[in-house]
Amino acid sequence: MSTYRLTATRRAPVTKDYKAFHGRNFREIPQISRLSRELVEEIAVVSQVFPFKVNNFVIDHLIHWDDAPSDPMFRLTFPQRGMLGDEAYGQVASALARGADQFEMKRLVDDIRASLNPHPAGQREHNIPSLEGMPLRGMQHKYRETVLFFPSQGQTCHAYCTFCFRWPQFVGPSMSRFAARETGHLLSYLRSHPEVTDVLYTGGDPLIMSTRNLANYLLPVIEAKLPHIQRIRLGTKAFSFWPYRFVSDPDAPELLALFRRIVRSGHHLALMAHFNHPRELESDVVQEALAHVRDTGAEIRTQSPLLRGINDDPAVWSELWRTQVNHGCVPYYMFLARDTGAHPHFSVPLVRASEIYRQAYQQVSGLSRTVRGPSMSATPGKIEIVGVSNVRDERVITLRFLQARTPEWVMQPFFARYDEEATWLDELAPAFGDEQFFFERAAG
């Protein structure tokens, strides 16, 4: 893989030392002493199963420790008892209490993880593309226009979200993770698929990488000058969890120079920023980071799942969208927590989700109404919950595809029986006595 050099005008950096804590050393966090012994033990148990990582910026600037454990940013980053079912929690707690050896603990934890639907929505069965019969494990191609690429050096994050649907990327066997070490196969695949217009670099978080390493993944695609590749996207939580990446990290000037280079090449560059709560936008350094990136010509689009106990309130969402627009971002998606990992702990019923979206939408101006949702990223595609309707004297949930494996399904409405408890597509039944939804019939 070639190494790319970037130059940029430097300024005196504001030094911020990055420090991360994991499940194995979380007791070293100074604020942990403010939590009850019971809560600390719960964190220790749950972090055996789910990945846990948090850094000093989150600890010092985002979490209101006086409100823990109910504080939304605490719940966003620290494992909670409810993330594991009673049986699994009891098994892990018992194993820890009796001092089970590492081999017994690994077998137990692996079995629990395997039961949590670690790769939802056909990620391994349907999304992995192939080139000349060879599966490309570091890529996914679910929707016609967009290819996802997983750079191997970007398969971690500055801190881990408790709800993350990619949690197996951080704790699963290396052979089962999505990761690619170089771009050769990506370029070959793109050359053979002229229908692809967008490449999304994801993870993990590609902005965990140094600028030099990031450039080694981005610039080969830019310099290939493939006429059909028009847009580059970077999925990131760095604005919230480590905004110094764009402001005062040693290679922040080179990072911004890389963004400018991509924009000047004629490609549209979009950073797909994850903000789950308005508090993540309050810090001056976060706002400075957003301004720096926008000054490069890149676009910032924002998205988040709807999460019980974190942001399941219309007022939170309306404030989130308004604040994002005020800082030049484009609200993009309200997702629903995917059916993996701790989904039962964070999920919101579809009917309630639709009402939260509707009420929040009513409170903002047209500039914030670019946001779409609430949306399930399910096996057949991204499905929007449009709302509750009365059709043929039956109360139904109206849905439609925003994206689909079969493009002809996009924007086609369909109906499910009204169900106040359903949290995911597989819990819904077709309305009007139908045995299958239209896309199930089409799939045969």
Image: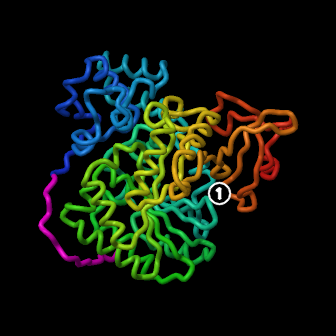
Q: Position of residue 20 (x, y in %)?
A: 23, 44
**Which three-letter amino acid code belongs to the residue tagged 1?**
Gln
**Where's the N terminus, which quadrant?**
bottom left
Residue 318 highlighted magenta (yes or no): no
Relative vertical location of residue 96 with respect to residue 175 in this rendering, above or below: above
Whether residue 103 can be seen here: no
Q: Name the side, left or right, on which 44 lies relative to 271.
A: left
Q: Residue at x 26, y 30 (%)?
A: 65
Which residue bears the numbered disc 1? Answer: 403
Q: Residue at x 40, y 51 (%)?
A: 323
Q: Nearer the viewer, residue 369 or 331?
A: 369
Q: Name the side, left or right, on which 75 lies relative to 381.
A: left
Q: Position of residue 439 (x, y in %)?
A: 77, 50
Q: Residue at x 29, y 69 (%)?
A: 255
Q: Residue at x 52, y 53 (%)?
A: 365
Give the class, few, some or many, for how many residues have Cα within 10 Å of label 1's Cα (few <14, many ≥20): many
Relative vertical location of residue 63 with respect to residue 198 in this rendering, above or below: above
Q: Indicate the quadrant where residue 26 lies.
A: top left
Q: Name the side, left or right, on which 406 lies relative to 348.
A: right
Q: Secondary structure at mark 1?
A: strand
Relative vertical location of residue 71 with respect to residue 391 in this rendering, above or below: above
Q: For the magenta stretch, what is the residue range?
A: 1-16
